[in-house]
Image (cartoon, grey):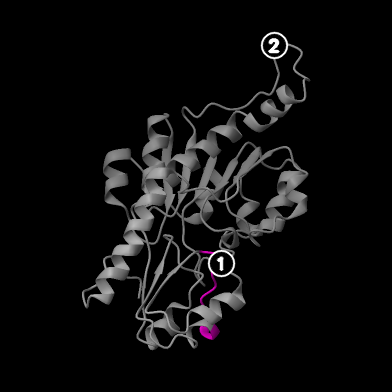
Amino acid sequence: MTRQELIKKVKDADAIISLLADKIDKAVIDRMKRCKIIANYAVGFNNIDIEYARRKDIIVTNTPDVLTDSTADLAMTLVLACARRLNEGEKLVRQRKFKGWRPKLLLGYELNNKTFGIVGMGRIGFAVAKRAYVFGCRIIYYSNKRNPDAENLLNAKKVSLKSLMKNSDIISLHIPLTNKTKNLINSEMLDLMKRNAIFINTARGEVVDEKYLIEILRNRKIFSAGFDVYENEPDINPELLKLDNVVLLPHIGSATHESRNAMSELAAKNVIAVLSGKNPLTPVN
């Protein structure tokens, strides 16, 4: 829906199932005359004015847990694609420039014995850490709270953000977009990375200083980066498209049959519960 269509159609709705692309701000909420619940079809909810919805007695829900594995799988896909330069290799073959095996053709990095830094050790961060651990990585993490399971099962070590950025060979972001996390990974943090570092973002584009990250990649100050989210999504910074040391995906972290079906069902169940006078399954506010 366009914004104009959205504003027009919410007026008489008892419930809204919203997508990340639907900006449910004060102007939209003020048009809602009967709405009891906004069920966001995503684990994130930065597209909704949560506090204003609460003041209007509108429940907001999301779809956590059901997309954890799919998003973690994709994060590791980006890690491997960056580490082994898969996009460059595929282009080489498609462009018929592959002339045979060479000793130094597209040299990448192995994951074994690398330090893997997780920014945000929640459900998805922990799922990524488990996958990285199987590949032989040492796990360090930065998070608001300790994760005893990660520490006990994976020997993960909680560190400061600066320490993580400085010591990690691979950095993967798994934090929500809030006022506190916006631009959390700023130029100061990005400058701490190793020259062989791989940087992965499957969280939200706005948590990173994207322009500065592009500059670092252009000047080969880190090895590679994988993006599934962008600062001004769906608009992509054209400078990103010029780089060959990046892997760019169209926000498909949860794009599996299993996850999207489960997300749909959970959003619907939240709506049914609230309209039936019951408590929502996964409330945000």
Residue at 33% x, 53% y: name it. Answer: 65
Majority SS type along the magenta span: loop
User: Is residue 85 among what the camera can see?
Assistant: no
- Residue 104: horizontal and vertical position, in percent? 70, 17
Residue at 63% x, 36% y: name it. Answer: 196
**Three-letter code for the amino acid on which mark 2 is drawn:** Trp
- Residue 43: horizontal and vertical position, in percent? 41, 60
| 34 vs 110: above or below | below
- Residue 234: horizontal and vertical position, in percent? 64, 58
Magenta stretch: includes residue 21? yes
**Three-letter code for the amino acid on which mark 1 is drawn:** Lys
Q: Nearer the viewer, residue 184 or 236?
A: 236
Foreground mark, 2 or 1?
Answer: 2
Residue at 38% x, 34% y: name it. Answer: 133
Left or right placement of residue 21 versus residue 70 in this view: right
**Magenta stretch, residue numbers:** 20-27
Circle 1 Cα neighbour tier, 10 Å, few/some/many (<14 / 14–19 / ≥20): some
| 38 vs 72: above or below | below
User: Is residue 178 among what the camera can see?
Assistant: yes
Label 1 sits on residue: 182
Label 2 sits on residue: 101
Circle 2 Cα neighbour tier, 10 Å, few/some/many (<14 / 14–19 / ≥20): few
